[in-house]
Amino acid sequence: MPDLGQKPGNSIAANIAPHLPFLRRYARALTGAQQSGDDLVRAMLERLLIDASVLDVGSGAIKVALYRELHRVVATPSDAAAVTGATGNLLGALPLGAREALLLTSVEGFSHADAAAILGCSAEEIVAAAQAANDAVMQMMVSRVLIIEDEPIIALHLATIVEELGHHVVATAANSKAAINAAATTKPELILADINLADGSSGVDAVYEILKSGEVPVLFITAYPERLLTGTRPEPTYLITKPFEPATVVATIGQALLLHRNPKAARGG
């Protein structure tokens, strides 16, 4: 990843740095993989090293400008073609702009007006697109869900959210060993996993062990997402921040299942 802080005369580096973990989260969710998402952010940063004039805005508008520039990379054939998994139209099977609208508003926390500024449309179009994406999520095939969470109240909350979407919670595990055993017997199609479990075991370690038996989309849940979004090592593709809103969980589940069941969606197929 280009290091803006190492470039002479780059006075905006300090303003950009706090937003990089969340740009990575968004790009990974949009493309469906860590590598392709990070490549998308890298391409954006390389453009900014050449010309950062698009960020000549007030400090309060830097975040919107960065996400808007990320979408300009996706929309530019010469840049998008060089980004693994990010060529062509990333909208996949959902209506135009639906995934982006839903992720920007429900996961990244942008207002409808800011999301509209990022995507270059009206706030009304954002509302309609996000609703279309939400409707598509509700119509998805039912999944068998494993929840790895040591706090009973949070586990119950997650279970309620996924069951209201029509999915089935096949098991809830409070530690790594129980999670691995549950996965072996229930064969989940989706995993929601806390990272730090009460007995000192790791939800990340449990998931990596489970994935040795086959690919399953995983949503990690953490109070500190920026620690897992550095772009310097193998990291989760989907992250939910604690405390979470139900809409964030719904949007992320929909994105994960869409790209797992229809990989061509991330390639514009």
Image (tube, helix red, strand yellow):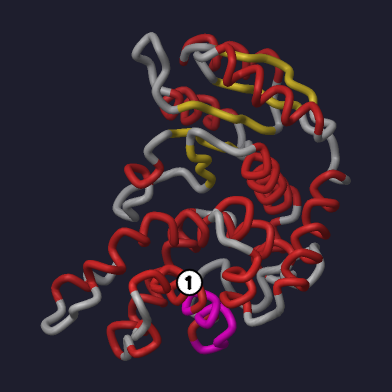
Examine the structure image and report whether residue 11 is included in the region drawn in magenta: no
What residue do we see at 41% from left, 77% from top?
A: 44
Residue range highlighted in magenta: 69-78
What residue do we see at 24% from left, 76% from top?
A: 12
Q: Is residue 231 above or below residue 184?
A: below
Task: Tell me the kind of residue under disc 1.
Answer: Val
Task: Indicate left or right for 209 with 249 as reference.
Answer: left
Image quadrant where one finds the N terminus:
bottom left
The percent position of residue 25, horizontal first and vertical second, equals 47, 54
| Other-residue count near label 1 (Cα within 10 Å), few / some / many at <14 / 14–19 / ≥20 | some
Q: Quadrant of residue 147?
A: top right
Q: Residue furthest left?
A: 8
What residue do we see at 41% from left, 34% from top?
A: 223
Image quadrant where one finds the C terminus:
bottom right
The percent position of residue 118, horizontal first and vertical second, equals 57, 75
Q: Is residue 210 above or below residue 130?
A: above
The residue singled out by tag 1 in the image is: 64
The percent position of residue 103, horizontal first and vertical second, equals 62, 57
Q: Is residue 204 above or below residue 98?
A: above
Q: Main secondary structure of the magenta part?
A: helix
Q: Quadrant of residue 2?
A: bottom left
What residue do we see at 40% from left, 12% from top?
A: 198
